[in-house]
Image (cartoon, rainbow, N blue to C red):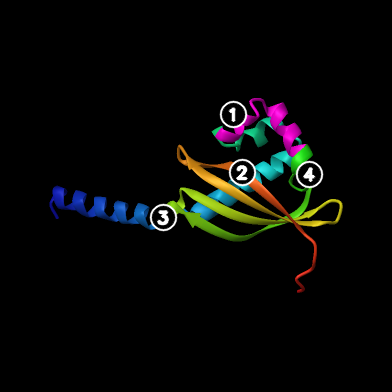
Amino acid sequence: MPVRSLYVVLSFVLFSFTAAKAEDPVAEAQAVISGQIDALLRNDAEKAYSFASPGIRSLYPSKDQFLDMVRKSYEPVYHAGNYAFGRSKLIGGGEMVLQEVMISAREGKDWTAIYQMRLMDGSYKVDGVRMIRNTASTGI
């Protein structure tokens, strides 16, 4: 086999392999959410703040202001007992991911957090969280 043909075949094989390993927006968004929750549980303001979008950072220009806001407004996330990922929705082909996170807070109350994740410069950032208190059991 001539060298040029071998190069074309190898290029095709390598291209096919990388194309088959497509990115998974939901998994990437979930990894960011887990990273932020873990940082909050360790009270690591700098790491938790690193996952925030530029829009959130403009509202809370320091990591301390950000952490104070999370403590006051998102206590179930700040002190998450257990959490699990629920449904997700891709918007704009993955430019945004809405991710449901079920949280059992330390005080024993259950919450659902809807994370709005935005793809920015190749990685997802937390661009907002809406908290919903679960007041009734949906059963097993």
Q: Is residue 17 left or right of residue 40?
A: left
How many C-alpha atoms fall within 10 Å of the one at disc 1: few (<14), some, or many (≥20)? few
Taking the spot 73% from the left edge, 38% from the top edge, the residue there is 70
Q: Amino acid at mark 4?
A: Glu
Of labels 1 and 4, the one closer to you: 1
**Residue 75 numbered tag:** 4
Mark 3 — residue? Answer: 21
Q: Amino acid at mark 2?
A: Gly
Residue labelled with disc 1: 58
Viewer-proximal residue, 32 or 113? Answer: 113
Q: Residue at x 25, y 50 (%)?
A: 11
Quick check: is 69 in the magenta stretch? yes
Q: Mark 3 is on which residue type? A: Lys
- Residue contact at pointers 2 and 3, CB within 8 angstroms: no
Return the disc, 2 or 4, that comes first in the chain's sequence: 4
| SS at circle 2 | strand
Against 109, residue 137 (above or below) is below
Residue at the disc numbered 2: 128
SS assignment at label 4: helix
User: In the image, residue 18 lies at what x, y percent?
Assistant: 36, 52
Horizontally, residue 48 falls left or right of residue 123, namely right
Q: For marks 1 and 2, give the CA distance.
A: 13 Å
For the question of whether residue 42 can be seen, the reply is: no
